[in-house]
Image (cartoon, rainbow, N blue to C red):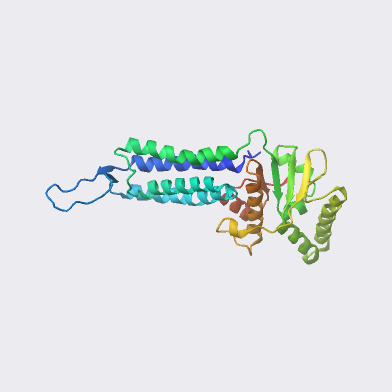
Amino acid sequence: MPKLIPLANQLSQKLSQIEKEILKLIEASTIKEFRNDPFSSVVFISPPYYWGETDENQKRIQMEIKMIYIPWIESFRLLFKNASLEVKKQIDETDIAIISYVEKNADWGLPATIEEAKIQFKNKIKTFYDLLRMVEDKNRRALIIVPDTNVLITSPDIAKYSEVVGETQYTVMLVPTVLSELDKLKITGREKEFRDKVTSVINRIKGLRLQGSLLEGVKVNKTITVKMIPIEPNFTNNLHWLDPTNNDDRIIASTLEIQRLDPSAIVTLMTSDINLQNKAEMANLPFVEPPGA
């Protein structure tokens, strides 16, 4: 059974990996002192210390760091999309500082020794750890499951989802793309048996409206709630690689918006689609297989 953790915890774990790689880069580097030529009449104004030459090993480490850090910072910024201007300023300043260490840019703040540089870097990256701890709520970790279209068709009994998530209390979120696909499949499905199955799922969802508002959430038993999201995902405030014309990407975008609105929650996709699973992993979203898969 997979261990499901909030996005903030996942980002913190990856940040630890990024920190180790950057410290490895610093450790492999050298710092030199700038000195003007005492016999020259020309005086250069320059930072007192600068990074030594970057060798092939350091260049390789730099590339490895960027491959991890660039998608990480995008997910991190998305989580704090609704943060205050002060917090966003902290994020910008810390991001610039970290990139400066990765690129080994010379500036007036570079210390005289590698050990001092490592301490300075740790102090800079601590801001990211502190912000991630800020959005954690250890006393409230709601579990939200976002099933894809095939899951609702093949596993319509949402009470059975507890078998794969290991919890009996959770909310099932129905996103617009999935509902749209269901409506389309009830008409375009090749076999009547399949179309009937899809229609049964749609009728089951419509039947929940008799119990209350799906926008606010309807309890199907004492511990399971079903909610419907009426608004399509906003791609201007989402991961840059998501394609609004691709339904898998639309599901990912909606799931990320759910996570952003409730940072302390554990938001997981439920899908057996390997391509959607790969995209979820790239977006730092946990996923689980449906029951019986």
* Any part of residue 268 in sight: yes
**Is 38 in front, or is 99?**
38
On the picture, is 100 further left or further right than 207? left
Residue ranking furthest to the top: 139
Q: Is residue 251 above or below residue 267?
A: below
Q: On the image, which quarter does residue 131 sit in? A: top right
Q: How many marks?
A: 0
**Is 137 in front, or is 197?**
137
Q: Residue at x 82, y 53 (%)?
A: 205
Q: Residue at x 45, y 41 (%)?
A: 125
Check the picture and name the quadrant holding the N terminus: top right
* Any part of residue 61 in sight: no
On the picture, is 129 further left or further right than 6? left
* Image coords of residue 190 (percent x, y): 78, 65
On the picture, is 267 further left or further right than 116? right
On the picture, is 210 further left or further right than 117? right
Q: Residue at x 82, y 38 (%)?
A: 222
Q: Residue at x 35, y 42 (%)?
A: 26
* Image coords of residue 97 (percent x, y): 41, 46
* Image coords of residue 167 (percent x, y): 72, 37
**Is 197 in front, or is 285?**
285
* Image coords of residue 197 (percent x, y): 82, 57
Q: On the image, which quarter does residue 182 sit in? A: bottom right
Residue ranking furthest to the right: 210
Q: Is residue 282 above or below residue 196?
A: above
**Is 265 in front, or is 269?**
265
